[in-house]
Amino acid sequence: MSGDPRECARRSARVDDPARTPLTERHVSRERTGIRRAHLIGGVAAVGLAVVAFVVVARAPRPVIPARCRIPSIVAGDTYSITPVQAQDAAIIAAVALRKGMADHAVTVALATSLQETQLRNLPYGDLDSLGLFQQRPSEGWGTRAQIMDPNYAASRFYDRLAQVSGWQAMAVTQAAQLVQRSATPDAYAAWETEARSLARALTGEIPTGVSCQLDGFGGLTPASTALEQAATTQMGAQLIGVPVSMKLGWQVASWAVAHAYRYHLTSVAFDGRRWTVASGAWKPIAASEPVTVQITMSAA
């Protein structure tokens, strides 16, 4: 943004979507706080007097597992936890860099910027006329309000301006970000560099199984069967699902798909002998097949 940074909790953002549909009846809505049931045990009679004994059995509340996506940190033993919507927007930022031929360092710069400005949230408001993932301003030539609220467009415009910065490839993250954003707090982006690099490493396919999401439901109505492929082509520049790909590219596509599982109702994503499922929320080994392609299964609603 060209303005002050947001005060945001780093990993506490929730996904509040009234249109969410449950995965199975076994899942519990996050609004529930617990279940308590009382059972009548029985009654006994003694010396002509009816004495009824009641025993209340309190059940412990069923655990509610919030929807979260987890990304391993570049710091050994640490993990970052973000919401599925944050993961989706982060994956779009990485996908657009792929489409535009930008190096992975550009993804780190862009993610650090969005983490500082909005905590990876596509906000319809901000300082003055700032809005979107990067708090870009229509009055400063970033585009129309509708364009900036499109994460695909916003990320593309960010990279366009970054590419105009001479020597950005060798710059520190906060320096490169500031030369694009021209913020009133130019050093603020440095605080997000480790998290941004960790997310970039996972979302650009530098590491396998970089993104895993535990979902408690899907977002909105079931999308058309072609919606995911259209989004993949628009964001990444080519249809990379179900076609032979290199190892690094394959893991970027697989991570992109898992990060989009909430929106597109995906039940499984498989690549290179491993599969993520919505049931487990984790990657598990499977029998590998050749050639190496990313395979996706959607919910049949």
Image (cartoon, rainbow, N blue to C red):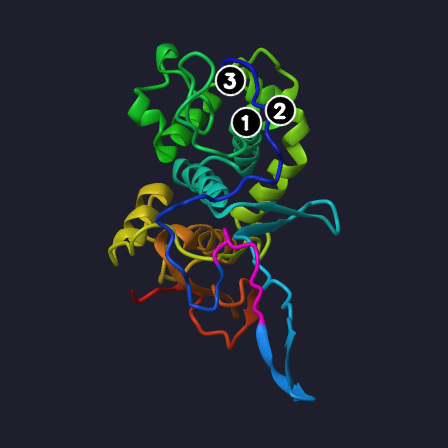
Label 1 neighbourhood size at 10 Å, few (<14), some (14-19), many (20+)?
A: many
Judging by the rendered image, the residue that carries numbered circle 2 is: 189
| Residue position marked by numbered label 3 in the rendering | 181
Q: Amino acid at mark 3?
A: Gln
Q: Earlier in the sequence, mark 2 or mark 1?
A: 1
Could you say whether the residue bearing mark 2 is in a helix, strand or loop? Answer: helix
Q: Amino acid at mark 1?
A: Thr
On screen, residue 82 versus residue 89, left or right, reads right
Q: What mark, if any, has residue 174 been given in the picture?
A: none
Q: Which residue is found at the position 68% from the left and 28% from the top?
A: 191
Q: Earlier in the sequence, mark 2 or mark 3?
A: 3
Instruction: Depth check: give the residue in front, 226 or 99.
Output: 226
Which image quarter holds the C terminus? bottom left
Pointer 3 or 1: first along the chain: 1
Is the C-beta separation of discs 2 and 1 under 8 Å? yes
Q: Residue 52 vs residue 299: left or right?
A: right
Alpha-carbon span between mark 2 and mark 3: 10 Å
Q: How many marks?
A: 3
User: As displayed, is residue 95 above or below residue 294?
Assistant: above
Residue identifier under label 1: 113
Q: Is residue 266 visible?
A: yes
Residue under the image location 56 percent in, 41 percent down: 200
Residue 54 in picture, x, y percent from top left: 63, 75
Q: Residue furthest right?
A: 76
Q: Amino acid at mark 2?
A: Tyr
- In the image, residue 173 sits, relative to residue 265, either above or below, namely above
Q: Position of residue 48 (x, y in %)?
A: 65, 88
Is 60 in front, or is 47? 47
